[in-house]
Image: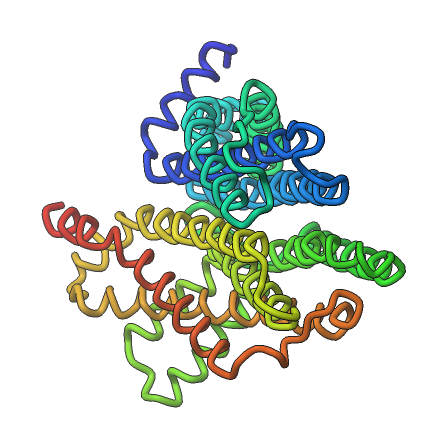
Amino acid sequence: MSLALGNGLARASVRARPSAFGGVFAVFVLSSTVVTSSVAVWRTASAVPDGALSTDRREALTSMGAGFTLVTVYLSFFVIGQVMGLAVAQRARENALLRAVGALPWQLRRMVAVEALLTALPALPVGYVLGRWLAGVWCEGMAGQGLLPRGVELRVGWPPLLVSAAVLVVTSQIGGVIAAHRAARARPSAALGEAASGGRAGLGPVRAVGAVLALGGAAALTAATLSAPADEAAEHLPLVLLAYLVAVGLAGPALGRLAAGVFGLLLRALGDRAEGELAVSHARAHTRRLSSAIAPVALMVAFSLVKFAAMAGQDGDPSWIDLYATALYAGFAALVTVNTMVMLTAERGREIALLRAVGTSPGQILRALSLEALVVTAAGLASGSLIALTLDRTLGTATSFALSSLPPTTWPALSTATALLILTSTLTPMPWLLRRGTSG
């Protein structure tokens, strides 16, 4: 397989699977947008003329911009790795066939790396344009709140573009290499068998060890935060939260199987309907793929709970920066969740066509998918809530937030909104898939 042939296969794969790589493209655009805006605001705050801001205010804004940038880069690595893993898992059959006809492991890894690069590069200019707009909105809001001088010049330029390019290129290549690792090292016969059966459903020793190490890292960060000065502890909170989320992402298959098992017991108690069994069976068999959706749901839930609790515990009204941070990261996680659920459903055309061919009604398919969406919702809500409770118990006093300060309606409102978001994004591709299944 020559370099030209490998690159040609990569381009063909991107064209042949628009849903998978369209989803990866969307995540790259989101990451580029948030990174660009964070760096632009950081530069804008740093360049305010002397005398227009107090030294303390300038240091606070510069620290805020740097903090936003750091968390965004960390978050980009996390979500891009998750979505790249899903995109590669969805082409397990093609990868297995390539191994069977003689493709070498390094050739598969290179092909996935080229695919990732071909998807990331077009996302860069789109994210840069959107990031400029978002930075302008951000700076106007801060000026309206008196945090920046009126009429301050927005500084974008080349640095945000270069940082965004570095993040996209590095994360796409690392995510591609990690995602292609299992497909590349599997024996051709084993890869074909695994692809035919829908993939391996277990957690696996590597992911299990990784989850334990991530939990250890989160515990170490928690200890470091507890020993930090009180005015710095709150700044460490997002990094601790993201460390726990890495553990959730690695343990996602186990969490998915646990949620599917609980739902299976509930469905049997309620009458063991056919679509319930179909949903639970599919969720158990594809927990690795569903785990890609569990992690962003957990992120959205945990970050929302922690930030809402922190704002509720403040004296007076929450600051504009706190509201913006909550909306930015919760919105980022929500969009990644929607994107992931659409990817998962859009790749099931062959399965839905088969179900229609054996007499399954559209209503049964929709109910089965709805139940699968509830499995993801339950696993994500439980994981995110557990992370928030853990942070409340360990860092609540040091960072001045308490989940007990939230109004009682917060939990049911967040659960309902999460379920509706996942259900809607899961069912969005269904009209097109059902029409294609009927016509096929």
Taking 309 as reference, is 400 left or right?
A: right
Quadrant location of residue 377? bottom left
Quadrant location of residue 25? top left
Q: Residue at x 46, y 39 (%)?
A: 30
Quadrant location of residue 11? top left
Q: Position of residue 399 (x, y in %)?
A: 75, 65
Q: Position of residue 342 (x, y in %)?
A: 34, 50
Q: Nearer the viewer, residue 409 or 75?
A: 409
Residue 383, placed above or below residue 194: below
Q: Nearer the viewer, residue 114 or 284?
A: 114
Quarter the C terminus occupies:
top left
Q: How are the colours assigned in the image? A: rainbow
Residue pushed farthest right? 227
Number of numbered discs: 0
Residue 33, placed above or below residue 67: above
Residue 193, placed above or below residue 49: below
Q: Position of residue 274 (x, y in %)?
A: 28, 76
Q: Nearer the viewer, residue 60 or 48?
A: 48
Q: Nearer the viewer, residue 432 or 169?
A: 169
Residue 271, placed above or below residue 252: below
Q: Is residue 189 visible?
A: no
Q: Position of residue 225 (x, y in %)?
A: 82, 58
Q: Is residue 119 visible?
A: yes
Q: Residue at x 52, y 52 (%)?
A: 324
Residue pushed farthest left? 439
